[in-house]
């Protein structure tokens, strides 16, 4: 049975009558058939969202009322935690403990934005101080309208929550298009929304490819705001599409994030965070610290320990005990990552470890943890996002050189610094041109803190209050309170 779109509170077949198959990357076997949405499906979904926004109760409910729905969604996600985590493992390939963590964070994201929705009732208006006693002014926040969301495959359900939860908290209605590579947990989110009795049309989910379903959504004149997470080339296309209607956009794009390790860092801790920064989720993390810069005085020792620990990583099917590295998400990603590794070798970098498919795994899109050294600053593998378990390690001789190397990138999503000298950490954190900086760690992400990039890594911020602001318009209401005539034309 083909999984359908969720539009206007109902399960609907695709206008195209076509479907695509979601594949388990560990077994290369099909899991489910999913409706392949097209422009007609998007038109239906946008008009349902438009109607729910213009005529339905959702934007007119109090924040507390909207918050109650979000809490219900969070509770239903938690009830289905194991099942949803297993679905994520099957669809995406990630190790089960990581998937479980993702689903807990997904529920946590709905809880967090439920809290912010509730607070909106108290912070309903802000009085503006004016220098003119005849006037009073206030600012109010209103939902931006119908939001469109397009998301990637690396954290499928969590990326959906990062957009759906703040949009709904703000009072927007939404059309979400999940990645065609991992659509299954987004469909489960639609089931949950239905179970939570979310009013029809508030959340609509259309599955399909980027060009067939994503593009009509981004181009749709009935969409007031587009929120996108994905690669830079697609983000750039979305920006051009939105430009035609001067649509509000936020973009969360790629990265090539640096991790700087100073000489006074504990080597064991450095190795642990390097590995977490690049091997977690098979390195398919936008903020992965894929460029590691190490003080030359500890470089040989650190490299020896890093290679020794990388060798110990258990690679396999995400549900197997002790697995810390699963398959890449699909064949195309597998081929892209192997091609990047090949390119690195052709460019003259030294492969210190890994580089291929693990010998014991004949099926599935597995790539060994891979470590490159002797990488030139001009090398493709140093400059471009690989989105796999591939790290480039380089040495540096001074703080200034480390910062310059780190900042020499068209990306600016994240960065990290490790040192026992916290003043130095703060100095370097401020000098790095990126939106997210970790000190003495890499990757831990909190829904309370802002998320987003500098430079080509994106526009705008998600998470925290910033994430809610993405879906709000600010309106000033200014009144002339004096009973006296204005006296410009009529004296
Ligand atoms: P992608 O750009 O290929 O696809 C992302 C989404 O865009 C998918 O849903 C896809 O169907 C859709 N899409 C593709 N072409 C489209 C088009 N022409 N019009 C409209 N929609 C289109 O990216 P991906 O391969 O799914 O994800 C990996 C990328 O996402 C990496 O570059 C990664 O860094 C980035 N990412 C960023 C963040 C962040 O928060 N900054 C988080 C996760 C992933």
Image: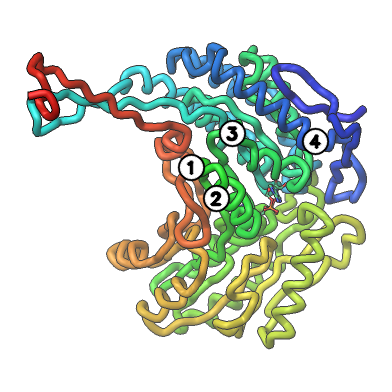
Q: In this rendering, would 425 be left or right of 378? A: left
Relative image position of residue 336 (x, y in whole percent): 77, 66
Residue toward you, 42 or 363: 42
For label 4, the SS is: loop
Q: Residue at x 41, y 58 (%)?
A: 439
Distance between the alpha carbons at the discs numbered 3 and 4: 17 Å
Distance between the alpha carbons at the discs numbered 2 and 3: 19 Å
Q: Going from the N terminus, do you reach mark 2 or mark 4 first?
A: 4
Q: In this rendering, would 172 be left or right of 318? A: left
Residue at the spot of label 4: 37
Residue at the spot of label 3: 223
Q: Going from the N terminus, do you reach mark 3 or mark 1 first?
A: 3
Q: Residues within 10 Å of mark 4 (few under 14, many from 20)?
A: many
Distance between the alpha carbons at the discs numbered 4 and 1: 27 Å
Q: Going from the N terminus, do you reach mark 2 or mark 1 first?
A: 2
Q: In this rendering, would 291 be left or right of 84? A: left
Q: Nearer the viewer, mark 3 or mark 4?
A: 3
Residue at the spot of label 2: 252
Q: Going from the N terminus, do you reach mark 4 or mark 1 first?
A: 4
């Amino acid at each position: 049975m083909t999984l359908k779109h969720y539009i206007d509170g109902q399960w609907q077949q695709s206008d195209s009558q076509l479907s695509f198959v979601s594949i388990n990357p560990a077994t290369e076997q099909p899991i489910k058939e999913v409706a392949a949405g097209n422009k007609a499906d998007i038109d239906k979904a946008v008009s349902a969202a438009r109607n729910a926004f213009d005529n339905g109760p959702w934007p007119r409910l109090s924040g507390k009322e909207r918050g109650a729905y979000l809490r219900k969604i969070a509770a239903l996600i938690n009830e289905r935690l194991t099942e949803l985590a297993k679905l994520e493992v099957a669809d995406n390939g990630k190790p089960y403990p990581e998937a479980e963590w993702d689903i807990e964070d997904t529920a946590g994201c709905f809880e967090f934005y439920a809290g912010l929705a509730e607070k909106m009732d108290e912070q309903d208006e802000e009085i503006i101080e004016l220098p003119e006693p005849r006037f009073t002014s206030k600012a109010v926040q209103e939902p931006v309208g119908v939001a469109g969301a397009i998301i990637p495959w690396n954290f499928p359900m969590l990326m959906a929550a990062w957009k759906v939860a703040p949009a709904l908290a703000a009072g927007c209605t939404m059309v979400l298009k999940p990645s065609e590579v991992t659509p299954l947990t987004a469909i489960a989110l639609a089931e949950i929304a239905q179970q939570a009795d979310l009013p029809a049309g508030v959340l609509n989910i259309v599955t399909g490819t980027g060009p067939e379903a994503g593009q009509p959504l981004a181009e749709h004149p009935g969409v007031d705001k587009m929120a996108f997470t994905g690669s830079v080339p697609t983000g750039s296309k979305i920006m051009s599409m939105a430009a035609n209607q001067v649509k509000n956009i936020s973009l969360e794009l790629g990265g090539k994030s640096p991790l700087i390790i100073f000489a006074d860092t504990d080597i064991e801790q450095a190795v642990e965070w390097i590995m977490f920064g690049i091997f977690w989720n098979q390195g398919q993390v936008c903020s992965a610290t894929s460029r590691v810069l190490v003080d030359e005085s500890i470089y040989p020792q650190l490299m020896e320990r890093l290679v020794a620990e990388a060798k110990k990583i258990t690679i396999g099917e995400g549900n197997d005990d002790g697995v810390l590295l699963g398959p890449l998400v699909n064949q195309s990603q597998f081929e892209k990552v192997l091609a990047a590794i090949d390119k690195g070798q052709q460019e003259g970098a030294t492969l210190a470890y890994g580089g291929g498919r693990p010998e014991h795994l004949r099926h599935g899109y597995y790539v060994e943890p891979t470590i490159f050294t002797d990488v030139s600053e001009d090398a493709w593998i140093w400059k471009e996002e690989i989105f796999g378990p591939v790290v480039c390690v380089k040495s540096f001789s001074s703080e200034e050189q480390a910062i310059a190397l780190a900042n020499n990138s068209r990306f600016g999503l994240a960065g990290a610094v490790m040192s026992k000298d916290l003043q130095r950490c703060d100095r370097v954190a401020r000098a790095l041109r990126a939106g997210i900086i970790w000190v003495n760690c890499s990757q831990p992400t909190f829904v309370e803190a802002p998320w987003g990039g500098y430079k080509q890594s994106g526009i705008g911020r998600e998470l925290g209050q910033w994430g809610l602001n993405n879906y709000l318009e600010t309106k000033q209401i200014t009144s002339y309170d004096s009973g006296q005539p204005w006296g410009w034309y009529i004296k």
